Image (spheres, rainbow, N blue to C red):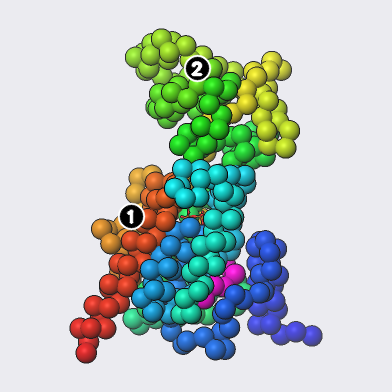
Amino acid sequence: MINRRKFIVQSALLSSALAIPGSLMSFAAFDQDNAPQVFDVIIVGGSYSGLSAAMALGRSLRKVLIIDSGLPCNRQTPHSHNFITQDGKKPKDISSNAKQQVLNYDTVSFHEDIALKMQKKGDLFELSTASGKVLLAKKVLFATGLKDIMPPIPGFSDCWGISILHCPYCHGYEVKGQQTGILGNGNVAFHYAQLVSNLTNKLSIFTDGPANFSSDQQQLLRKNNIRVVEQKIKSLVHQGGKLSGILGQDDSTHSLTALYARPAFEQHCKIPVELGAGLTEQGLLKLDSVQQTTIPGLYACGDNSAFRSVATAVSTGSQAGSAINMALSTEIFNLR
Ligand SMILES: Cc1cc2nc3c(=O)[nH]c(=O)nc-3n(C[C@H](O)[C@H](O)[C@H](O)COP(=O)(O)OP(=O)(O)OC[C@H]3O[C@@H](n4cnc5c(N)ncnc54)[C@H](O)[C@@H]3O)c2cc1C
């Protein structure tokens, strides 16, 4: 017989083990028994932005714990582009290299887990995780990214990040000159059309229903030889994520090898919003000039609050790391 508390902890461990790829139970340089009582900073999210912040904080001798559930948004993409020094590398290789460098600083530790809940405890933040850990920190940084919501078009999620692309800067060069589609409507699709027409002149827009362009936009699309297909989409034709066409409701096929799309998204981690942190109209965390959310002591960086690129994630992470260090330094200095 196991008691109720044991049962809850074991269930949480089991469910998080199912959710996190790799060995969840393995702690990289973190053992709660030997860990400091209170971390200077807990960073939730250990991908590009979180690791970049940890670098600045580790080099400032801050006791930092990174908690990461191992699900970065670009995990299905074979190669990452447009980040200088790492162009064309596998996304995982970039973050593994970053993690290795960050863990060279012995005040930084990394724990594979899911941050579930947080509350204020006096001046501190108390964070509970899926594996049953309860951790305290002076400041918390959310580097948790966004979760893309796949539209219910058969084949879409298989092709996402492989031949369905969110960003011409990241992947447009690799498909230049190819038969290309834009899945979208109105201003978003028109904006993509302006951008992508620089990379290919074989371009069509698939609106998956009635088109919604102004008459000026329609005229410009025509002048630029961009076809608008209003037919409802039945499915995407692909092999292993590599597109060969779009199948319409009438079973006609439109051949193409690349498709731009901007699916809806949500915050990957709900904790900041549950605590009352403000969001922008676009659904990003609202920040001040030092990467602080609308909740004092709670910071954010990377995709959850900025333009989506590895370079921006690294840049905002580094800014958040130094801003948090400055805040801690000032608080300690002024108390002496
Ligand atoms: C398909 C695709 C392809 C892309 N290709 C490129 C490219 O080629 N070049 C480029 O510059 N950019 C590219 N991007 C954008 C780039 O991947 C992102 O800008 C970047 O990953 C953002 O880094 P981040 O650290 O903010 O978030 P992410 O990399 O998404 O990482 C967030 C981390 O937080 C963790 N996390 C979330 N919630 C919790 C929680 N509650 N507890 C613990 N951990 C949690 C996640 O598991 C994840 O590891 C691409 C994006 C997509 C979607």
Q: Amino acid at mark 2?
A: Asn
| Relative side of 307 to 32, left or right | left
> Residue at 35% across / 82% down in the picture?
122
Does residue 214 appear in this view?
yes
Q: Give the CA distance from mark 1 to mark 2.
A: 38 Å
Magenta region includes residue 112: yes
Q: Which residue carries the number 2 mark?
A: 201
Magenta region includes residue 280: no
The percent position of residue 62, horizontal first and vertical second, equals 39, 78
> Dot 1: what SS?
loop
Label 1 crowd (10 A; few <14 / some 14-19 / many >=20) = many
Badge 1 or badge 2: first in the primary sequence: 2
> Residue at 45% across / 21% down in the picture?
197
The percent position of residue 303, horizontal first and vertical second, equals 44, 51
| Relative side of 273 to 259, left or right | left
Contact (CB < 8 A) between labels 1 and 2?
A: no
- The range drawn in magenta is 109-116
Check the picture and name the quadrant holding the N terminus: bottom right
Q: Which residue carries the number 1 mark?
A: 286
Mark 1 lies within 8 Å of ligand 1 (Cβ measured): no
Does residue 141 appear in this view?
no
Secondary structure mostly taken by the magenta-highlighted segment of the chain: strand
Task: From this view, report whether residue 168 is shown above or below residue 87.
Answer: above
